[in-house]
Structures are given as structure tokens and as C-alpha cells.
Amino acid sequence: MCATKTRSQELTASIEEMIAVGVLEPGQHLDEIELSRQFAVSRTPVREALIQLASVGIVEIRPRRGAVVAQIGATQLVEMFEVMAELESLCGRLAARRMSADEHAALRAIHDACRLASEQQDSDAYYYKNEEFHYQIYLGSHNAFLAEQARALHRRLRPYRRLQLRVRDRVSTSWAEHDAIVEAIIAGDGARTAELLREHITIQGERFADLMASLSRLAVKTG
């Protein structure tokens, strides 16, 4: 029983990663038999993994259709990014007041790794380092409940945050925004950090149009 539980947890992480990187796209059907063959397991841990992903909104389980990768409408997506912007803003405000010198060093190290990925125009590498960067700020808030909520919503928005990074020049722009955020945190300027993170996460104007265009292309492919 314990082994099955562990395997289902591993499958949950693997399937979530496939969704995040676009191997499995919004609206795509998730066939239990196909997934069990792909991962060389029985259907039971696959089903458990899909139920777990459904519990956090990454997958939808529909009557007579089975599981599909969740799709978010334009309005809901903007609303979720609005909430994400406020959560990150609050994390940043607290991190600017509470992060230690060691935590500053860790943040700079991750920021440098983001810079290398940005200079190489490697959006995939940048994506993972970008996650680490934001998680470091959540931890730096020293508010476990807030960090948990921020990570949960970040997790839910992973596929869409990744899509944003594939827009031309977004990676280099994102790194420049990170640079200002790091300096504000290390300076202990909570208000400035909060403002910068809110602007960094909020999607509007051209960024909104670019994201919607990316989603439209996915809809054509999976439709």
C-alpha cells in the first residue's frame, strides 16, 4: 500500500511536469491506459495521480469523458494572475524586511543562474530557475501560511507562466525585472519590492494579448 502511494505521488509529479512544459496541453484527454503503459504501472496509481491533480485544479475529471488537462478561461486567468500578483507582492514586502544575509546570498545565486539562462536565450532553463527565484522570495517572507498559498497558486498557473516566457524578449525583460526586485529586497525597501513584484506578475496590455494568442494556438492544436 505504501509503495503504491509513493508511486502515485511520483506519477502526480511527472504528469504535472508534463502539463507544465506543454507535453500535455490544456483540454487534452488523459487516457489512463496510455499513461499506465507510458509509466509501466497499473491503472490504479495513474488514477490516484489524476485524482490528486484534480484536487488542485490542474486536471478535470468529467463524467463519461474521463480526465482532461484543465483549461482556464481568459477572465478567470486574469483574475488568478491578479491574486498571484498580490500574494507575491505581500511575500516581497515581508521578504524585504525579514530575509537574512544568507538568504540574500541564496537569492543572488539564483538570480545569477537566471541571468545565464537569459543570456543563452534558453526559456526552458530560465523557467525552472525563475521558479526557484520566486520560491526563494516566498520562503524569505518567513510566513509559512502565505508561502504555502503562493506556491499553490504558482503551481496552478505553471503552464501559463511558462507560455509567457516563450514570447519574444520576455525572458530578458523578466530578468531585468528580477534585477530591480533583488536590489529592492536587499535594500530592505518593502514598498518598492511589493510594487515591483505586483507589476512583474500582473498580465495586461500587450502581455495579455500575447498570452491569449499563445492559448489560441494551443486550442487549435488540441481541438
Image: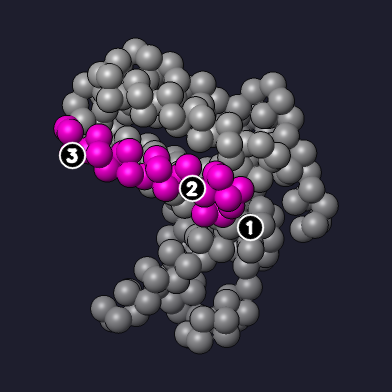
At mark 1, the secondary structure is loop
Q: Which residue is mark 1?
A: 22
What residue do we see at 30% from left, 15% from top?
Answer: 189
What residue do we see at 55% from left, 25% from top?
Answer: 202
Q: Amino acid at mark 2?
A: Leu
Could you tell me if residue 63 is visible in this image? no
Residue 216 falls in which quadrant of the image? top right
Q: CA distance from mark 2 to mark 3?
A: 21 Å
Residue 107: give x, y in percent of width and height.
31, 39
In this view, 212 is above or below 29: above
Query: Residue 132 shows which numbered tag?
Result: none
Magenta region: which residues?
100-127
Q: Which residue is mark 2?
A: 116
Residue 25: give x, y in percent of width and height.
66, 57
Judge by depth and name the residue closer to the eye, 214 or 104. Answer: 104
Q: Which residue is mark 3?
A: 102
Judge by depth and name the residue closer to the eye, 199 or 1. Answer: 199
Residue 124: give x, y in percent of width and height.
56, 54
Could you tell me if residue 71 is visible in this image? yes
Front label number (2 vs 3): 2
